[in-house]
Image (cartoon, rainbow, N blue to C red):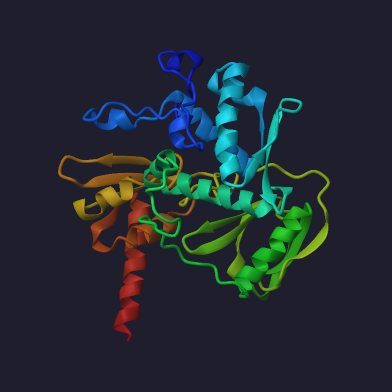
Amino acid sequence: MVPGRANSVAHRSDKVPERPVANVAAMGVAHGTPGKGDAADTPSASTVRKLMLLVCLMRQGRVQMARFLERFEVSERSFKRDLRHVRELAQEAGFVISPIRDGVVTMALQSSGLALQIDKGRRDVEQLLDTLARVLGEPVGRQLQRVRGDNDAGPLTRRFLHFAFPELVGDTWVADVYDALEKIWSKNAYARFMYPKHDQPRGVERLVEPHAVVARAGRYYLIAYARVAKGWRYFALDRMLTKPQAAGTIPTPRPLPDYIHLDDSIGMIIGDAKTKRVAVTVELTPRAARTAVSRRWQHDQEAVMHEDGSASITLHVTDVDEVVRWTLGFGGAAHVTDPPEAVARATQMLEAMAEQYRER
């Protein structure tokens, strides 16, 4: 969204039309003239501000007026006028927006005549939705921006866009491990658990500072700082041999270093700042080209579409096997072309797979 400026709506009247109840039209939607195309559906700067104000109140339960004025470059008078319209809409939905107190506005939920602050669970859901919108890209982002609030959209259970992701089933080992880790993390404590090691079948004890859990390719990974190894590591939750236990309070939480990007679905962990990363290039046929280049797999990927509909993409990793496995997911529609060691590794993996099938 492009922040609106105070003078950008000088040509439009902000007077609220007479109506029995508040509605989105009262928030300043530019109706336009029939036959003008998309311009007729473009929301005004005032509408954008009011929608953002409402979304922020629903997500966080409070908004600082000074930050809002700075973000949208509007006057305090404009903010109060926007707030008045949003307050009317919120009241119809069963919410109460407070007066401005010490520069802060809060939202509460009406229940049996009592005002209850919006619960943490609701904010968590809103945060998850924002994360999905960012990860999944434009289809979701556009739908969020086009929220109108009219009554013609149908019931909330009626949706056209759905997401097919592997669901983490409750009351299973991975779910239990996750719950234990989240409790440890919320207490700002160290986590202790047993984890496999190739030369020790029973595993070794790990003492770590938990930072985050990342859902990636259908699996869940703990990103943590290992005390013994003195470095950042990732641990698959399904491979943990014991349920994590709290092991004392962390005096000062360690920040995640800049060279680790949790949003990368390829090359999530790159060792340390001095670890060498290999640029692996994959060529894709027209059948798979757009599927690959229309997604951001990592923050510094290099993708190019060719005139014949094919494409090439270069990904940076410390372990070339990661890109090879990703490439094999496209079947014959993709193949590794560079560097030679990555091509050789892809050949080895394919030959090993073929041998397994021949042995059957």
Judge whether residue 118 can be spotted in this image: no
Where is residue 67 drawn, in percent x and y? 63, 25
Point 51% across, 35% down: residue: 51
Q: Nearer the viewer, residue 317 or 255?
A: 255
Residue lying farthest to the left in this orientation: 308
In the picture provided, is 35 more to the left or to the right than 348? left
Where is residue 69 drawn, in percent x and y? 60, 21
Compared to residue 142, the image places residue 266 above or below, namely: below
Point 62% across, 38% down: residue: 57
In the picture provided, is 269 more to the left or to the right than 162? right
Residue 302 falls in image quadrant = top left
* Figure quadrant of the C terminus: bottom left
Judge whether residue 97 can be spotted in this image: yes
* Figure quadrant of the N terminus: top left
Point 79% across, 62% down: residue: 246
Point 51% across, 44% down: residue: 276
Compared to residue 273, the image places residue 153 above or below, namely: below
Residue 240 falls in image quadrant = bottom right
